[in-house]
Image (tube, rainbow, N blue to C red):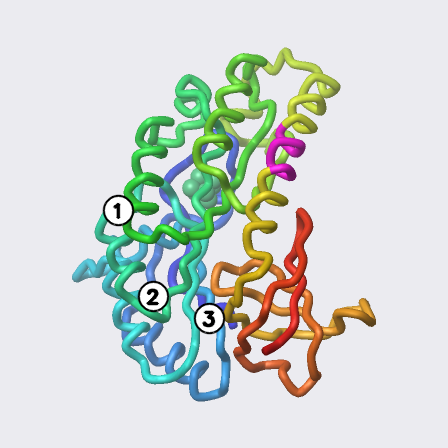
Amino acid sequence: AFLPVMYGCNNFCSYCIVPYVRGRERSRMVEAVLEEARSLVEAGYRDITLLGQNVNSYGKDLETPVPFAQLLREINAIPGDFRIRFMTSHPKDATHKLFETMARCEKVAPVLHLPFQAGNDRVLKVMNRRHTRAQYLEKIRDLKALIPDIVLTSDIIVGFPGETTEEFEDTLKVLEEVRFDALFTFIYSPRPGTKAAAMPDPATRAEKQKWFDRLLEVQNHMSAKLHAAYVGKTVRVLVDGESDDPEYPLTSRTEGNRLVRLKGDKALIGQFADVAVTGSNTWALYGEAV
Ligand code: SF4
């Protein structure tokens, strides 16, 4: 289930239209969120994703501000066998307190989608991202120290107006240092009405495509390596559906949201299961329910 906890965004990244079309941040009252979470758990939902354009900024606008970490603790305290996830988080609001809370709350999945968009400080500044590369990397180190098996994913924009080859290469360096499990990558495209849409953009589309392909190559190699390390291990998954592969007829997700294609009985759909991982590729793990 998807559970919206806040709407809008105050950040005004220079390429993004969201604050103009969705307005400023508005958080739902804690009680309303808890009531909805309780009824989802009672209805049998096993995997609940808290949603917000800038979800970890939740609660700052409430009459009595409530930190997002507190909301997580209160949802975690709801009785039942279920997982909690949240997206999308902004690095500037990803605090040590939040990481500690994730580590302590057994229902909060060890996964964080934390967009960094670009690895070069000049580009980050013109993007108005409000964090530097060093600040981002420091947060990742802090999080990994608290949750060593954290699954990390991110968004990246390739070819922001004015980005040079050297600046793009700083993005590759971040990939190599962090070792993300997966990335959502985009070649920059202008959104009319945003500041970035009016910026000079001298790099050609062909050049940007080359950067994009390099980035995918680095990431695919890394994803394949991270996935291969799972072979021989047993992981807990939530079985969430059928696939069209007759050899692995079920699909499932690990706590960290990795796709696992599965041998097993259809009766497992909707259940948590332990799975012996027997194979992997860039995109998925393969296994058998044990
Ligand atoms: Fe807000 Fe995300 Fe858009 Fe930035 S990219 S303005 S944080 S919604």
Disc number for residue 48? 3
Q: How busy is the neighbourhood of tag 3: few (under 14 within 10 Å), some, or many (20 plus)?
A: some
Residue 257's place in the image compared with 131, above or below, is: below
Q: Mark 1 near mark 3, Cβ–Cβ under 8 Å?
A: no
Q: Are marks 3 and 2 in contact (CB under 8 Å)?
A: no
Magenta range: 215-221
- Cα distance, mark 2 to mark 1? 21 Å
| C-alpha gap between disc 3 and disc 2 | 16 Å
Mark sitting earlier along the chain (2/1)? 2
According to the picture, the residue beneath numbered tag 2 turns out to be 28
Name the residue rendered at 42%, 25% in the picture.
Answer: 124
Name the kind of residue labelled 2 in the image: Arg
Q: Secondary structure at mark 3?
A: strand
Q: Secondary structure at mark 1?
A: loop
What is the spatial separation of the Cα atoms under label 1 and label 3, in whole angstroms?
22 Å
Q: Which residue is mark 1?
A: 95
* Three-letter amino acid code at the position of disc 3: Ile
Disc 3 or 2, which lies upstream in sequence? 2
Q: Quadrant of residue 247?
A: bottom right
